[in-house]
Amino acid sequence: MANRRLLSLLYPLVLSAFLMHCHGNERKVHIVYMGERPQGGFSAASTHHSMLENVLGSTSSAKESLVYSYGRSLNGFAAKLSDDEVRRVSEMDGVISVIPNHILKLHTTRSWDFMGFSRGKLGASQEGAVLIGLLDSGIWPESESFNDEGMSAPPAKWNGTCQGANFTCNNKIIGARYYNSENWYDTTDIKSPRDTDGHGTHTSSTAAGREVQGASYFGLAEGIARDGVPNARIADILAAFDDAIADGVDIISVSLGPEMPLPYFHDPVAVGSYHAMRNGILTSNSAGNNGPDPYSVSNFAPWTLTVAASSIDRKFVAQVVLGNGKVFTGLSINSFDLNGTVYPLIWGGDAANYSAGFNTDFARYCENGAMNSYKVAGKMVLCEVFTEGAGILLANGAGTIMADSFITDYAFNYPLPATQVSTEDGIEILNYIKSTEGPNPISPDILKVMKNMNFFILFENSEKFYMGDMQPDLTAPGVNILAAWSPLAPPSIYEKDSRRVRFNVISGTSMSCPHASGAAAYVKATHPDWSPAAVKSALMTTAFVLDSRKHPDLEFAYGSGHINPLEATNPGLVYDASEADYINFLCKQGYNTTTLRLITGDNSSVCNSTELGRAWDLNYPTFALAVEDGQPIKGVFTRTVTNVGSPNSTYAVSMYMPNSIKVIVEPSVLSFSSTGEKKTFTVTVDGPKIAQQPIMSGAIMWEDGSRGEESTSCV
């Protein structure tokens, strides 16, 4: 729409970390982290080059080794080092950590309406003042979602640039950079911020894409594709953070992370987001897709917003109708219309490619090359495992039914007609095939879309419960999300799928993260003077409360609840936190004064105690208490809230808790006489000795009669 204003900024991560599996003295890329950028006339490149020269022994070797010099917003560098050189650099003054370069995993319409956020209430000028920086696989600038029609020039605070050949920015995508520390490119990659994967285009358009009428995936999920703050501005990990902070963004969105959790200052996302926080920038990051296993959250730093994924009121299914009339419903984003055609049905195990050395044990799983194309051609094939469909497609099969209960909640796109049924249903279908002679008829229905308002899928579980805060922080739509796509990327999970689309439907915490980023940008646009912690608190305490009876993983799966962008602009009270709060938190995690002074660049940063402890006094919007087997439930939490509502207001506490837990909040009434006034309260939790007790949860609410903010409590 011509009257919609949107500026955007993207920092794409284009295959920036390629890990070579080698040993000994072969040099590999490492990140040398040195904390905050020193003030004054500090020359990062000169300092880092000098350090490398001392270790490597020559100017030329240092120049050849240096990959990146971080010095715009933080202090550090990336360099090619051998194991022995890594050891020597680690021992140098000022070095906090040396991090091996490793691959960070990408955490891979209707969704904003589902959250009750059909339209924001802010004007274009307010929304257009917010800059969102995205670290991802790139962006496709020609997508309709990034059209800049009717938009003004970027705000004066913008300090970025548009980098790369064959890539043009506009008043929507106002800047773009690409990073590739290993200088390794796949055959499909382009040496620019241009996206060849699709992931970055999808997340960018979710967080800050313009409205596109009639967007769909081969006619499915048709509607209006848009973002949460359509007038916000969008933007190799530390390098991208270093630039994004200096370029002037307000929110950083990161839909990627390590396979498993890393210590804070060995994790480039935690490091970069810490320096972003110091500069007033909130980092919204995906929790990862390894849940609901414990200790599975990949991004968990308390100064970031960690986002789980949940579903919306849409589920993609494809039905299978057997010749005997029996119907089975499976999961599939099926873009193929078979027009009611009846196809013969065979079991993959009966179509082994013996000429290629395969037998029934391989063919039952329909592996690529394992199928006899003479038997498969023109037939529907039952496979006993989830696959991408290539084995049947390349054997000229008409389609596939995959029997696998590993994934039960969300669907994938395939390069041929396909559906995934449960293992139990697969046994029934196989028995049907074996019960009659010859191929059996089957009629796969075209895709159906089922709506179920209470259908929730939760990708994540908690990682940092024992530390006194709880992750993830909240959940946002991340299942079956329609958004823009790169025309160079395949539209299905089969990487050689030659079809092309402008929009695609995919799932994961990668998709939920930009929803939260867009919501954070909306809150920031409403309250530009709020700190990152205040924005985060507002989003958490106003989240939709989920029914714990329906979700056995409870808050470990969804945190404070489901994000509610409109309510987050008016929370009444916020749990604010400064860098000093996080320094105190880090002291209790074992970091010492020397290290923290390097991180902060401030000699006033002091750990008063080196004793490890629980972070119960971190001013966090949730309360979490870990209890060892055989010990009583006991904990005392201190919190401070800031009034951001009416000047003269009084809040009374209410709560709901499990019967076995006694909770006292003192004082139970908080009275404020001005906006910005702060009040402190304590929460004392007591209960009996417990052992092998699953998570118990409740909530503490402060209410003033017109609004309420809720803090989750877990034991």
Image: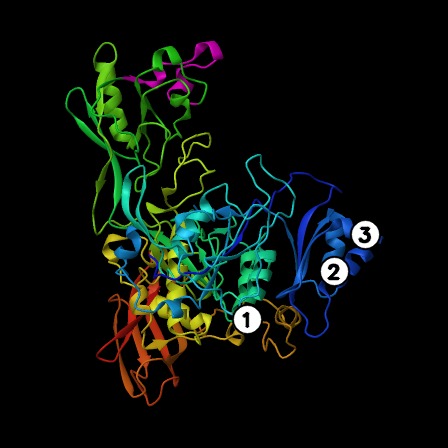
Name which quarter of the figure residue 53 lies in: bottom right
Residue 409 in view here: yes
Residue 17 - label: none
Distance CA(mark 2)–CA(mark 1): 23 Å
Closer to the camera, 442 or 335? 335
List x then y, in percent, for residue 299: 48, 56
Q: Residue at image x 61%, y 43%?
A: 18
Report the amino acid beneath label 2. His
Vertical order, 63 against 47 (above or below): above
Name which quarter of the figure residue 407 lies in: top left
Distance CA(mark 3)–CA(mark 1): 34 Å
Q: For the magenta stretch, what is the residue range?
A: 345-367
Q: Which of marks 3 and 1 is nearer the N terminus?
A: 3
Q: Residue at image x 23%, y 40%?
A: 449
Vertical order, 413 against 165 (above or below): above
Closer to the camera, 108 or 548? 108
Please identify the quadrant where the C terminus is shown: bottom left
Q: What element carries label 3?
A: helix
Q: Is residue 369 left or right of residue 244?
A: left
Report the amino acid beneath label 1. Arg
Per the image, the residue denoted by label 1 is: 278
* Magenta span contains residue 279: no
List x then y, in percent, for residue 269: 54, 57
Residue 56 - label: 3
